[in-house]
Amino acid sequence: MNLLATAALWQALAALPGPPARVVFASSIAVYGALPFEEAMHEDQPARPLLSYGAHKRMAGILLADLSRRGGIDGLSLRLPGIVARPPSPTGHGSAFMSDLLHRLCAGEAYACPVGPGARAWWMSLPCCIDNLLHAAAIPQAQLAPQRVVQLPALTATVGEVVQAIAQRRGEASCRIDYHPHALTEQHFGRFPVLHAPQAEALGFRHDGGLGALLRRAVP
């Protein structure tokens, strides 16, 4: 349904008279599938989704680029990293542990983490994400590559590094955490390589700058 509804919306926009509308699509790093954990990743990494969610995001991005090529709309897909901190919710979504960890530890509550301290992810605060989405809406069309895709810069950090940053900010008592790694959760959401995104940075996109700034924005 997410894919079909998105396609229908864009087709409707493309049919409107007048100049093409700028469409900023919140895509996802789920399009990459499994990544080489010990290596750096650049923006030309091929998309090989392993989950239906990532496959639908990939298909929507292809459609957006094609409609933009044909002049129906003026689209740009942003591949979002892990956005924190989302409101607490028992959704069961695999990456929800990133937000749950921040909410629980910053509130001084105990947390059973489904990945180990060495699990590495790409992090971005919600305010930083909003800034990037608004920036994408204003970039001149001439600056956009034909594929109409941008991998947003993100902070690359392990769960252990994030816990340490929380401890420095809130005190060691805030970090009552037990690790109970779940193999599939860690495989899909805790095995990201170091990210380099110079093309996105040249377009003016930014990450939070450091874990201290991310925490201040993510959990005020």
Image (spheres, helix red, strand yellow):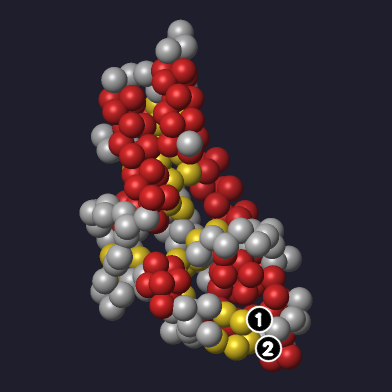
Q: Is residue 149 above or below residue 64?
A: below
Marks 1/2 in contact by CB < 8 Å: the verdict is: yes
Residue lying at 61% horizontally and 58% vertically, measured from the top left: 91
Q: Position of residue 92 (x, y in %)?
A: 57, 62
* Callout 2 amino acid: Arg
107 lies left or right of 217: right
Compared with 9, 164 (above or below) is: below
Gap in angstroms between the C-alphas marked 1 and 2:
6 Å
Residue at the image point whose x is 75% and y is 82% from the top: 108
The answer to which quarter of the image holds residue 45 is bottom left
Report whether residue 88 is seen: yes
Left or right: 109 in relation to 205: right
**Which residue is label 2 attached to?**
176
Per the image, label 2 sits on a secondary structure element best described as loop
Q: Which residue is mark 1?
A: 111
Looking at the image, which residue is at 28% across and 78% down? 38
Residue at 70 percent of width and 84 percent of height? 110
